[in-house]
């Protein structure tokens, strides 16, 4: 009985034993062949990649910061500045770049020519990143004139000034108004300029070809690091206003020179731009808000253009001597004191000379976006007709929106003490005519501008025609000869 049951179970197990169907066997074979093909494709791809891996070029990874030095600036904001700079440098002509700088209306700090705040000079130094140096340390204000010629011209200039002052003295005694003092200042500036240009014109050709102008407007703008401002963040929703705090502020300067002398060539630099005190001097620091120094922000400030005292295209585009009137500082001296008035006059000279050189740099294609590749220099005379002081300025950089780590370069200003032209006028005589003032005037006017020997507009793709060598300012008149036929009369 048991054996019969075991035999029946064995037959049942053999009957229902799972067997590989034809479909299952095909599936196994297809999977096997697919695996072989995948293996072959991998091997083939590895062979190709090993042979062509050297020729494959991948897109470059964008660095965190743009090329150059950026100091502590946020990397995203640095890329914004870099994009603005590249867009600006792509403008091919000078006028287009100037228009791009002045077209935007934005909040700015306007540097008025005169500011009677006791700390105004400190802020002007920071705004222009200028190191103030005593006049005695300026060793480059030399020219080819001999000491004997200097003494001769000083005597001749002294004679001219003496005759003029004696002629005007009676008028000043009868009328001592502020208007008369301004008239005296303007007249003596014109006298000194005419006398020196006339006497030195034959020996110094640049005085014959220079341009002399009076009451000249100078306008300029730049951005300065270290002054906070709110910058609007662009959003998809125009109703949502978001702002970022950034460390750069637009600064605008406008003012008049009483007179200026300009030339076709620039003055030589006083010191090297990339060495010495240009980079080793400590930059001025701003410890408080601008309002502490007597300067306030102006909302939506805009200037019409950047002006260096002449129209764009004038061949005499480099400044030699700028003359500023200080008559308006007399009221400051009466109200506040001598020391504040003296610093007020120095701040006036510093601001206007920097603005003048910055505008000259803009005419060469440079700005705070495209920094200078060479220094620009100029000289300034400050006077009210009796008290004189002198400045010599070297503009090294306009990239003032970077911090001191990214841009350690500073601008340099040598300044003299205030000196009286004469002591007094008594009994028809000039007492104590100051020869030091006369000697400085002679040396400043005889400083010779020179050709630098390189392209002064290296970033401008469309180089304008040099107006200095142009001869056809007035087009030639074309005369068409009119031929009149002789009339013949037939006499019958």
Image (tube, rainbow, N blue to C red):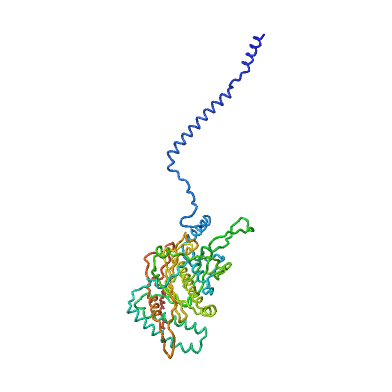
Decide: is 175 above or below 81: below
Q: Quadrant of the N terminus?
A: top right
Look at the image and tell me whether residue 474 can be seen: no
The extreme top residue here reads 1
Image point (46%, 36%), residue name: 46
Decide: is 401 above or below 176: above
Q: Quadrant of the C terminus?
A: bottom left
Along the horizontal axis of the image, is 173 left or right of 138? right
**Front-most of 230 and 466?**
230
Q: Residue 73 at x, y = what percent?
A: 51, 57
The extreme right residue here reads 1
The extreme bottom residue here reads 427
**Front-most of 96 and 363?**
363
Q: Residue 185 at x, y = what percent?
A: 47, 81
Q: Residue 249 at x, y = what percent?
A: 54, 64
Look at the image and tell me whether residue 447 can be seen: yes
Q: Residue 287 at x, y = what percent?
A: 53, 65
Q: How many marks?
A: 0
Q: Quadrant of residue 481?
A: bottom left
Decide: is 189 above or below 83: below
């Amino acid at each position: 009985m048991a054996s019969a049951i075991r035999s029946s179970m064995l037959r049942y197990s053999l009957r229902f034993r799972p067997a590989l169907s034809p479909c299952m066997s095909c599936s196994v074979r297809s999977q096997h062949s697919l695996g072989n093909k995948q293996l072959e494709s991998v091997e083939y791809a590895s062979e190709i990649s090993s042979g062509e891996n050297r020729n494959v070029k991948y897109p470059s990874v964008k660095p965190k910061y743009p090329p150059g030095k950026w100091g502590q600036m946020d990397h995203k904001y640095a890329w914004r500045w870099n994009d603005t700079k590249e867009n600006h440098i792509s403008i091919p002509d000078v006028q287009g770049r100037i228009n791009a700088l002045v077209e935007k209306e934005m909040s700015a700090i306007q540097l008025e020519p005169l500011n009677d705040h006791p700390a105004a000079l400190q802020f002007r130094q920071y705004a222009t990143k200028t190191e103030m140096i005593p006049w005695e340390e300026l060793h480059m204000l030399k020219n080819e004139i001999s000491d004997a010629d200097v003494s001769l011209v000083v005597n001749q200039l002294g004679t001219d000034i003496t005759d003029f002052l004696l002629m005007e003295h009676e008028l000043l005694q009868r009328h001592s108004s502020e208007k008369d003092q301004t008239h005296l200042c303007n007249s003596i500036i014109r006298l000194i300029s005419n006398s020196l240009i006339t006497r030195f014109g034959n020996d110094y050709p640049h005085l014959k070809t220079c341009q002399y102008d009076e009451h000249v407007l100078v306008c300029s703008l730049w951005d300065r690091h270290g002054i906070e401002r709110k910058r609007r963040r662009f959003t998809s929703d125009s109703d949502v206003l978001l702002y970022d705090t950034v460390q750069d502020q637009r600064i605008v300067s406008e003012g008049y020179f009483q007179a200026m002398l300009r030339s076709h060539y620039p003055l030589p630099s006083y010191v090297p731009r990339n060495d010495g005190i240009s980079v080793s001097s400590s930059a001025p620091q701003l410890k408080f808000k601008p309002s502490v120094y007597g300067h306030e922000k102006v909302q939506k400030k805009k200037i019409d253009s950047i002006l260096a005292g002449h129209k764009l295209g004038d061949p005499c585009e480099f400044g030699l001597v700028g003359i500023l009137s200080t008559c308006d500082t007399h009221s400051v001296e009466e109200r506040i004191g001598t020391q504040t008035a003296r610093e007020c006059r120095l701040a006036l000279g510093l601001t206007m000379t920097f603005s003048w050189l910055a505008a000259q740099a803009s005419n060469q294609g440079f700005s705070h976006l495209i920094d200078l590749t060479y220094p620009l220099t100029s000289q300034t005379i400050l006077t009210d007709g009796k008290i004189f002081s002198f400045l010599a300025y070297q503009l090294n950089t306009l990239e003032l929106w970077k911090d001191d780590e990214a841009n350690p370069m500073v601008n340099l200003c040598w300044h003299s003490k205030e000196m009286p032209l004469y002591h007094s006028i008594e009994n028809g005589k000039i007492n104590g005519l100051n020869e030091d003032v006369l000697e400085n005037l002679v040396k400043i006017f005889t400083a010779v501008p020179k050709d630098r020997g390189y392209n002064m507009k290296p970033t401008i793709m469309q180089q304008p025609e040099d107006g200095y060598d142009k001869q056809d300012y007035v087009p030639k008149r074309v005369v068409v000869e009119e031929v009149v036929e002789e009339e013949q009369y037939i006499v019958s």
